[in-house]
Structure formats: structure tokens, C-alpha cells
Image: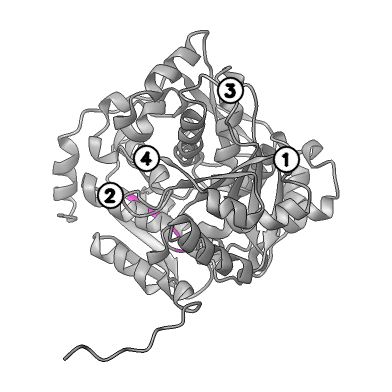
């Protein structure tokens, strides 16, 4: 793939122009509530600064539910089948960006081991970069193309970076990626092989994120930072939309929808998008109930879970400024590198959406995450990296806390493949001794 600028421009010239979804009407600041129309060029609230994360808003008429139902049936279009609920118009988008469509995996043996009534895994490890974050990257490419930009950038501990590098290489876009110096070598290899420019930052993820924001603004690149760009969270929403479609048999019955959805939490983007998806479907009348969404953090990077516990109740009544004040930074240290975040950038949005579902945040030690990796592989046939397994790792803690009842149906998002960080799994394995051959 040619990344010299002229090659990227040539590749993009083959694509038709992208129009905004007319049903996307703008964004609202999750902290102060200020509204912005679709022409607003900033990524965060002008009044609240970097903490003023925006939330995409849609206006639907009486025919919206039917449009969503009909579109959702076009499985081959990947995440673009949910165009009515996204801030882009898929009719003009290149097929290379049509990621998604992962099927639910029923895991009765694993459910029995965990003491759960039933368990469904939403396994996104089969996406192009082996991570759920391809869904956000697809939206990022569409938005960049619409704006006439050919260069995207982000900060990432690995998965967001890989998703950008992989899909950018397909579409003829250039990418620059800022990673903490300690990011796994396997993930860095994936970026470099797909033509990304990789900047290793001698610091934490949070410091890499800050540097990326400065460089994005200075160079007029498109931001693929989900903790900064509100439209990318909408792409991640499609994992939950697909899950709801599959388990409700095409939005015809809510009987088999999960009662609880377990989601790993780093910046808070996936958990907020999961909750938002179910809430939107309920508003449209496509489902008649919303699962309780439980965000699971690693104990060594649990700023949201700790703040939630300190609140001691009444979390649903917290205002944006109260949430911003309640969630304080921690020094992140966990084996789950993709959720090793000291201060979740999307903390306010995540808190508010999780609270709206009646859910909660909790944390689990690294040892529980490692045990879950082993159980997922040996009993469910899914090889997850530590961050990808973190959501399901919260099942036991959630059950003990009364967040999962004895007859609750549980779904868990597995967000990244184990081959992205095989060292974590290798540490749990005992290598067999070689035996002599026959001759």
C-alpha cells in the first residue's frame, strides 16, 4: 500500500462522497448539557474543555423503527446495516470498511463453571484487526473521507492503533499512532506491517494521549481517539446492536435478551456505547427492556469502579460535574494493557449510561483475568487477551455482589484476541517435555 500522500489521495478519489446521516442532528456535552449542531468543528465542549465529552444525538420520526429493522437485516453490510443509528451515511462508503457481523456464541459449559444460568459471548476477535475497535475505526475513516482528510491519528495501548492501521491500509489513508513505550511488541508489529507511522512515547498511555491531541490539532489530522471524538463511540455501539438483533430474533421478541451485559472498561467508550445501544433500541420500541450493563475494570486501573463504590448509592442522580469530580486519577498498573488507563477519558458518559441501565462498575484482580483467559479458551473455545477477557472476569464478583441473579441471562463482550498479547497466556502454561520420535 502506497502511503506517500499521492497514493492515499488516488485511492480516495475512487470513493464517492460521503453525506452525513440527516437523522444525526448534533451532539450534547455530557458535563454541562450544551448542544452543538453537526457543523461544530470541535471534538469536546468549548466550555468544559477536554472533560466535556460530547454525545451524538439523533432525531427519529415514526418510521425510524421500521428503517432500523429493515436495515439490520442486511447482514452483509456489516455495521453499516445500522446506518439509521450512526452519524454517517453508508450508501457511499467503501465495502472495505464494512466490518462487524460477528455471531453470538452460546457457552453452556462456561456458564456452568461460573455458576451462571446462561451465557452468551459476543466475540469480536474475528474482526480484521482481531478487536472490537475496528467498529470505531470504520466510522473514523468514513468521517475523515467526508471531511476530505487523508491522515488519521490516535493514541493507543494497542487495539485502537491496530484497528486504525489495518483499515487505513485498506482505504489508502495515512495513519500516525502514539503508543506508550511498554506496549506489547506483537501489537507494534501489526501497526508497522500495515504501514502506520508509530511514535513510541516514553511514558504512560495518558501521556501518549495528551501528545496525540496536540499533534492532531497542529497537523489537521482526523482524530481516531474514542476518548476524544464522540462520533467513534457510535461505531462501537454496533456490537450491542448486533447482539440485540440476534438474541431478539430480528427485534421480534425480547424474551431471550440478556439481563446483564459484562463489558471491559478502559477509557469507558465501549461500556457507554453498549448501554447507549440498548437504551436507543428501547426508545424506538424495538426491545421492551434494557439489560443492566456492568463495566469491569482491572483492579490496578479502577478509577471508575473506585469512584462508583465511594458514591455508595444514588449514582444515577449524579450530574456531569459531580461525576467529573468523583472520578480521580490512579496510577494504572495491570496485565490488561488495553484497559490500563489512569483516568478514563469517557468517564462521565460511561457513568451516566451505565447508571441509566441500572448497572454498575466493579473491579477484578489480574489473577481473575488470567483465570478467565484459561476458562474462555478451554471451556468456550475463545482465546482472549487480558483486556478482552476482563468483562467476563467480573462475572463471579458481580454474582457475589448481587448484580447477577440466579436466573439471569448474561452476555459478555470479548473485545480482543489472545494472540495480541500471548505472553500473558504463556505465563499460565506448563510446556510439555519433548518425547523421542519413532526413529
Residue at coordinates 61% horizontally, 28% vertically from top-left? 279
Q: Quadrant of the C terminus?
A: bottom left
**307 or 177: nearer the viewer:** 307
Marks 2 and 1: in contact by CB < 8 Å?
no
Residue at coordinates 46% horizontally, 62% vertically from top-left? 377
Tag 1 residue:
320
| SS label for mark 1 | helix
Q: Residue furthest front?
A: 438
**432 or 359: nearer the viewer:** 432
**Residue 47: x %, y % from top left:** 64, 39
Q: Which portion, as a residue range, is magenta?
A: 152-157
Tag 2 residue:
168
Vertical relation: 41 (above or below) 2: above
| SS label for mark 2 | helix
CA gap, disc 2 and disc 4: 16 Å
Does residue 73 appear in this view? yes
Tag 3 residue:
287
**Residue 244: x %, y % from top left:** 51, 31
Tag 4 residue:
100
Magenta stretch, main secondary structure, is: strand
Please tell me whether mark 2 or mark 4 is closer to you in this view.
4
Amino acid at each position: 500500500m502506497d502511503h506517500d500522500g499521492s497514493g492515499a489521495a488516488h485511492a480516495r478519489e475512487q470513493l464517492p462522497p460521503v453525506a452525513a446521516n440527516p437523522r444525526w442532528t448534533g451532539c450534547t456535552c455530557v458535563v454541562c448539557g450544551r448542544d452543538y449542531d453537526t457543523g461544530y468543528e470541535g471534538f469536546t465542549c468549548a466550555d468544559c474543555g477536554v472533560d466535556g465529552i460530547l454525545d451524538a444525538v439523533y432525531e427519529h420520526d415514526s418510521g425510524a423503527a421500521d428503517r432500523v429493522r429493515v436495515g439490520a437485516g442486511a447482514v452483509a453490510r456489516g455495521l453499516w446495516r445500522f446506518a439509521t443509528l450512526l452519524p454517517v451515511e453508508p450508501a457511499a462508503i467503501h465495502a472495505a470498511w464494512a466490518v462487524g457481523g460477528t455471531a453470538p456464541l452460546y457457552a453452556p459449559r462456561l456458564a456452568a463453571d461460573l455458576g451462571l444460568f446462561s451465557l452468551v459471548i459476543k466475540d469480536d476477535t474475528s474482526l480484521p484487526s482481531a478487536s472490537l475497535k475496528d467498529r470505531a475505526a470504520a466510522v473514523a475513516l468514513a468521517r475523515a473521507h467526508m471531511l476530505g482528510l487523508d491522515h488519521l491519528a490516535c493514541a493507543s495501548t494497542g487495539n485502537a492503533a491496530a484497528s486504525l492501521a489495518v483499515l487505513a491500509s485498506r482505504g489508502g489513508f495515512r495513519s500516525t499512532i502514539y503508543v506508550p513505550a511498554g506496549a506489547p511488541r506483537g501489537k507494534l508489529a501489526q501497526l508497522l506491517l500495515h504501514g502506520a507511522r508509530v511514535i513510541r512515547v516514553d511514558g504512560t498511555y495518558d501521556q501518549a494521549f495528551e501528545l496525540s491531541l496536540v499533534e492532531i490539532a497542529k497537523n489537521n489530522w482526523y482524530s481516531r481517539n474514542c476518548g476524544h471524538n464522540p462520533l467513534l463511540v457510535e461505531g462501537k455501539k454496533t456490537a450491542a446492536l448486533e447482539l440485540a438483533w440476534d438474541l431478539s430474533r430480528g427485534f421480534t421478541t425480547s424474551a431471550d435478551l440478556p439481563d446483564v451485559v459484562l463489558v471491559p472498561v478502559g477509557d469507558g467508550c465501549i461500556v457507554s456505547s453498549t448501554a447507549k445501544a440498548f437504551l436507543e433500541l428501547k426508545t424506538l420500541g424495538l426491545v421492551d427492556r434494557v439489560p443492566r450493563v456492568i463495566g469491569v475494570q482491572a483492579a490496578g486501573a479502577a478509577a471508575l469502579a473506585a469512584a462508583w463504590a465511594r458514591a455508595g448509592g444514588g449514582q444515577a442522580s449524579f450530574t456531569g460535574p459531580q461525576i467529573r469530580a468523583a472520578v480521580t486519577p490512579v496510577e494504572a498498573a495491570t496485565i490488561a494493557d488495553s484497559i490500563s488507563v489512569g483516568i478514563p477519558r469517557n468517564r462521565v458518559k460511561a457513568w451516566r449510561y451505565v447508571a441509566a441501565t441500572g448497572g454498575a462498575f466493579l473491579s477484578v484482580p489480574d489473577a481473575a483475568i488470567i483465570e478467565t483467559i484459561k476458562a474462555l479458551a478451554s471451556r468456550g473455545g475463545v482465546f482472549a487477551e487480558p483486556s478482552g477477557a476482563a468483562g467476563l472476569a467480573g462475572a463471579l464478583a458481580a454474582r457475589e455482589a448481587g448484580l447477577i441473579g440466579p436466573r439471569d441471562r448474561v452476555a459478555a463482550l470479548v473485545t480482543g484476541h489472545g494472540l495480541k498479547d500471548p505472553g500473558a497466556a504463556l505465563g499460565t502454561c506448563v510446556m510439555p517435555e519433548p518425547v523421542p520420535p519413532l526413529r
